[in-house]
Amino acid sequence: MQGDIRFADVLEKMGATITWGDDFIACTRGELHAIDMDMNHIPDAAMTIATTALFAKGTTTLRNIYNWRVKETDSPVRDGD
């Protein structure tokens, strides 16, 4: 199982309803709430969680996202060199 599957766990902590089947995962959005979470264990999903947080009530804090500078933010500049 991929580590990014833990994204569903984060959605659940934010207030979504997650249904796990044998060959599917279904997500039903309830009222989403802010979280304060260490993203070190799921760095590739952190940007998607940040986007999801735009729809949550409260202020979300995502910690340990230092790898964004290398993996995401600087990519267009690095690739264009």
Image (tube, rainbow, N blue to C red):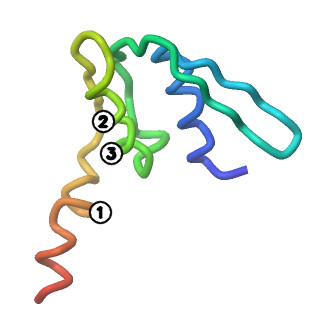
Compared with 72, 5 (above or below) is above
Q: Residues within 10 Å of mark 1 (few under 14, many from 20)?
A: few
Q: Which residue is mark 3?
A: 47
Indicate which disc, 1 or 2, sits on the residue closer to the N terminus: 2
Q: Are marks 1 and 3 in contact (CB under 8 Å)?
A: no
The image quadrant that residue 59 belongs to is: top left
Residue 58 - label = none
Determine whether, in the image, residue 63 is placed left or right of residue 49: left
Compared with 7, 1 (above or below) is below
Residue 17: where, in percent of width, then height? 62, 18
Indicate which disc, 1 or 3, sits on the residue closer to the N terminus: 3
Q: Residue at x 25, y 10 (%)?
A: 58
Q: Which residue is mark 1?
A: 71
**Separation of marks 1 and 3 at Cα, in angstroms:** 11 Å
Element on which disc 1 rests: helix
Compared with 43, 14 (above or below) is above
Q: Which residue is mark 2?
A: 50
The image quadrant that residue 38 belongs to is: top left
The kind of residue tagged 1 is: Lys
Residue 10: where, in percent of width, then height? 51, 26
Q: Are marks 3 and 2 in contact (CB under 8 Å)?
A: yes
